[in-house]
Amino acid sequence: MGKSRTSSGSSSFSSELDKMQPGDSHAREGWGGKLDFILTCIGYAVGLGNIWRFPYLCYKSGGGAFLIPYTLFLLLCGLPLFFLEVTYGQFSSLSPIAIWKVAPLFKGVGVGMLVCSAIVCIYYNVIVAWTIYYLFLSFRMVLPWSHCNNEWNTDRCIDDERLRNFTAIAAAMNNMSNFVVRNLSLDSNNSVSGFDSMTETSALVYVRGNKTVPASVEFWERHVLELTDGIENPGSVRWQLLIFCNKRQRLYDCNVMHFAAPFPYLVLLILLVRGCTLPGAAEGIKFYIVPRWEKLTEFNVWGDAALQIFYSVGMAWGGIITMASYNKFNNNVYRDAMLVPLINCGTSFFAGFVIFSVLGFMAHEVNTSVDKIVSQGPGLTFVAYPEAIAKMPVSPLWSVLFFFMLFTIGLDSQFGMFETILSGIIDEFPHFLRKKKTILTAVACFIEFLLGLACITQGGIYVLQIMDWYCASFSLMLISLTECVALAWAYGADRLYKDIALMTGFQPHFWWKYMWKFVTPTVIMFIWIFSVVTLGPVTYGTYTYPTWAVVIGWFMAVASIVPIPCIAVMQIVNADGPLLHRIKHLCKPDDSWGPALPENRKRYLADLDPSELDLSVSLNQMIVPHKGSNVCDEATVIFLPKA
């Protein structure tokens, strides 16, 4: 290796760097303000899962005791993976597919992330459409799910008026001596035919049983969904939801993140204050936070806590990488990586107080316990909450606030996933697509809209349940595991530390290195084994899916995993040399890997060791800034053999 000094080499150095820019990345968009990234990450990570999934798991898994495994897995998986994704996303200014120039053998990881986001985007849009529909119907003096006088209600429907009549009759019967009645039920005229002797309290509990259906349930199943008897009978498209899905797609171009990210916290605070004033709220909150320590001995509790971290923090979806790629190179990535996951998990805990104060009120209304009220998923959001809100004074106001909050939360998360898809495609073909982002956005919206039509048929909830059951579970674990191993071992944890120091001016604590290399991959493997073992066939209530539907579900589940080995094989086939040499070469950074802007790339190349430089640079001769010199005046020319 020879070297010489020159003062005329800086211009050729800049031109070579421009040629090496990954797809004209220096023209890539960026965040306008310092808070844009944090607000968008919070909005992306804080989703509907914080509102309906975390509180249910916390209730089911030991109340306050659930926070122990939840916090543990946040430290072992959530923070390390979030820090990892933010770091190399910001460093390279590339989206999930193009970023795998860092180790081309693992490019399928990026494709898998986009597949996950694309599938979830399809049905997430439908969930938000439901939310808009409820919001639209909330602007009424009387909420339509609060009574049984609608055209879709049946004789089994029960509302407050029928409940009062029923209770009065039951109380009267209780006062009659030696009066025994059998087979109690309500007919369409609110009269009672055939009785059992019962108290007023038991009558209240009875109407929540199988023989009567709350008005909110009938509104959800018979009006919003027009639910069929199974996936075999899809029925027709619900035109109301079709309209809202279509309008929903047009919101992606709106710059709403500064409003959408903090607004849910304001609504949650208002609902918490209101919820705490309701009778029974204290019992609901007590049920939520009082630890049931015996639950910690159950394996499922630990597995559920780990899975919830992946759902809530947002690793392996590609969204974190995409949003970090718009950061300025010198942004304090360490601070943001610690702040966002903690805010997200704190939001889940805070939302639990809001939710269980309302559930405690619902239990008080029917004189039963909270464990008889709690449900999960759509049943909590679109049945339990509307029913509780309908019983509050000025119920339309609280309904508007609640569903508008859900809309903004859904909008944030949908924005992050959709932007991930767009950026991933554009960064693969930057010269052709970057100037046509508006057209690409419209086309992608239309495609997602068409694919979502199956979810807004009368049997669409069965399709949506399959997608949610299989597409957002164990595939995320394998993607995260591969990502962590590739970056910590193939690219190297030591090199990552140098990249962080190049961006922030300091290296993080040494323990992150051991987390990335050993602890986090081991824990992820444990979670993956748990999810595979415990993931049973998809269900919806008591409905059992046919075999062909379960098979389709598994096909969707592996759709995001298959690209990892397939693209690895393609990369090996297209490479030159002996097999082991190809694999080794593909595990190292591509020639164009590095910071996007020329001034940052110069610093990166100057920081490389000779052993790293000959694998990272394709030029036969590379001009590297001489240490201690002005880059514009003098540079060191290092002649290297072509790798």
Image: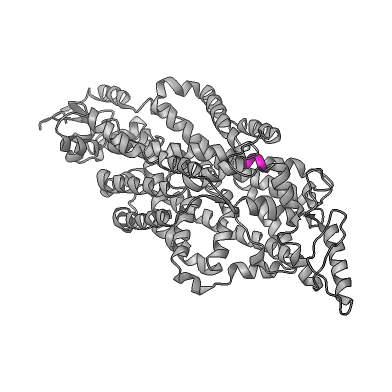
**Closest to the observer, 156 or 588:** 156
In the image, residue 463 above or below residue 356? above
Q: Is residue 369 left or right of residue 86?
A: right
Q: Is residue 560 left or right of residue 10?
A: right
> Going 51% across and 69% down the picture, which residue do you hit?
65
Predominant secondary structure in magenta? helix
Q: Residue furthest bottom?
A: 177
Location of the N terminus (image quadrant): top left
Q: Can the viewer see residue 259?
A: no
In the image, residue 580 above or below residue 526? above
Name the quadrant containing residue 487. Answer: top left
In the image, residue 295 above or below residue 248? below
> Going 43% across and 32% down the picture, which residue do you hit?
424
Q: Can the viewer see residue 531?
A: yes
The boundaries of the magenta stretch are: 127-131
**Closest to the observer, 27 or 218:** 218
Location of the C terminus (image quadrant): top left
**Closest to the observer, 215 or 263:** 215
The scheme the figure's colours follow is one colour
Q: Position of residue 500 (x, y in %)?
A: 34, 46
> Going 44% across and 43% down the picture, which residue do you hit?
554
Q: Position of residue 227 (x, y in %)?
A: 67, 43
Q: Position of residue 166 (x, y in %)?
A: 84, 63
Q: Is residue 9 left or right of residue 528?
A: left
**Is 642 part of what is drawn in magenta?**
no
Name the quadrant containing residue 367. Answer: bottom right
Name the quadrant containing residue 358. Answer: bottom right
